[in-house]
Amino acid sequence: MGSTLRQIALECGVAVSTVSRALNGHPHVNEETRRLIRETAERLGYRPSAAARALRGSGTRTVGVVLPDMMNAFYARTISMVQDQLEERGHSVVMAVTNNEGRRERTGLERLIASGVDGIIVVPTPTRRPPTPEGPPLVEMNRRSSRRVDWVGYDEDEGARTLAGLLVGAGHHDIAFIGGQPSFSTTRRRLEGYRRALAEAGVEPDPRWVQLRAYSPDWGSEALGRLLALRPAPTAVCASSSELVLGLLIEARRRGLRLPSELSLVAFGKTDWYAVTDPGITTYEQPIEQVAHIAVQLLADRMAGSTADPTTVLVEGRVVERDSVAAPPTGPEPPCGTAI
């Protein structure tokens, strides 16, 4: 099997983008570095893929990437993975950030199209309009707004079902769900999985246990406070993102609430700090690198001229069990329902 740009970069001690520029004749590369990279590529048997060659021969050799939020660690990691994949195929990245606003998304897309990008990868806002046929190829990733374009995302429904099932298996019946904007397809799919797990266990959830508003630490804190004020209060929580978990943990510490003896917690997100909190957080990890690779490959096929029907790819994540789940507290009133 031939080498990749990433392997060449590791051998030479340079960035993947430097390798890409050197092999594609970019003028702003030191000649000694260019020579080292080319010799290393030849020694390792590097051969560009057919898709990569097609990409390098088209348009501006730039791809637009539209993301909702760069402060979110999930999307920061996503853009890093997408950029690596695109640079391996000879493309540079032009990015637009929407802050989950439809108006900013429309403006960003219009500017990318006007700049002549060869294609676009977008995590859509809920208000995104269907793509127009005259625009460049477009692939949706993670969230979904239209079945008329290629899409790759995570099996959110099954992830939430598995997480909630772990709580049921530990003996919980009073299980809450804290999520973001209900208009997001990801929120809806995770909520569906949570409800399906409870239904399969014969559990009828209290509607007040579903708290939806925003993917933010502030909402995570406020939502937990609302849940603890209920009677009965839930004995476990399924949190839909790392931002929500952060806020929840801050509120739990402020109240002196002990996890998992007084409240069990499961969450979404491939987040390093889940492993070092006390307790470590049981989570559904989304395979970001795999989804980034598929999104770029789908776009590469379109930019190379594919006219196939739109493709849908659903990628399974994995549940990592840590120490944030225990049996529910005993007694007439669970400790987590006590105002502290």
Image (spheres, rainbow, N blue to C red):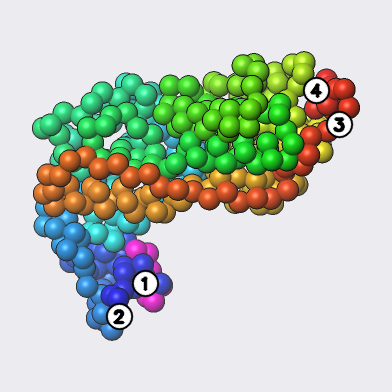
Q: CA distance from mark 1 to mark 3?
A: 55 Å
Front-lying residue, 110 or 332: 332
Q: In percent of the image, x 13 and y 48: which residue is there?
A: 306
Quadrant of residue 57 within the rendered picture: bottom left
Residue 44: mark: 2
The residue labelled by disc 3 is 330
In x, y percent, where is residue 12?
37, 75
Q: Quadrant of the C terminus?
A: top right
Q: Is residue 70 above or below residue 93?
A: above
In x, y percent, where is residue 96?
33, 36
Q: Kindly check if marks 1 and 2 are in contact, taking CB atoms under 8 A apart as contact.
A: yes
Is label 3 in a helix, a strand or a loop? loop
Residue 98 is one of the magenta-drawn residues:
no
Is label 2 in a helix, a strand or a loop? helix
**Could you tell me if residue 117 is visible in this image?**
no
Q: CA distance from mark 1 to mark 2?
A: 9 Å
Q: Kindly check if marks 1 and 3 are in contact, taking CB atoms under 8 A apart as contact.
A: no
Q: Quadrant of the N terminus?
A: bottom left
Q: Kindly check if marks 4 and 3 are in contact, taking CB atoms under 8 A apart as contact.
A: no
Is label 4 in a helix, a strand or a loop? helix
Q: Residues within 10 Å of mark 3 (few under 14, many from 20)?
A: few
Q: Which region is colored magenta? A: 11-16
The residue labelled by disc 4 is 337
Mark 4: amino acid: Gly
Q: In percent of the image, x 36 and y 27: which residue is there?
A: 125
Q: Residues within 10 Å of mark 2 (few under 14, many from 20)?
A: some
Q: Residues within 10 Å of mark 4 (few under 14, many from 20)?
A: many
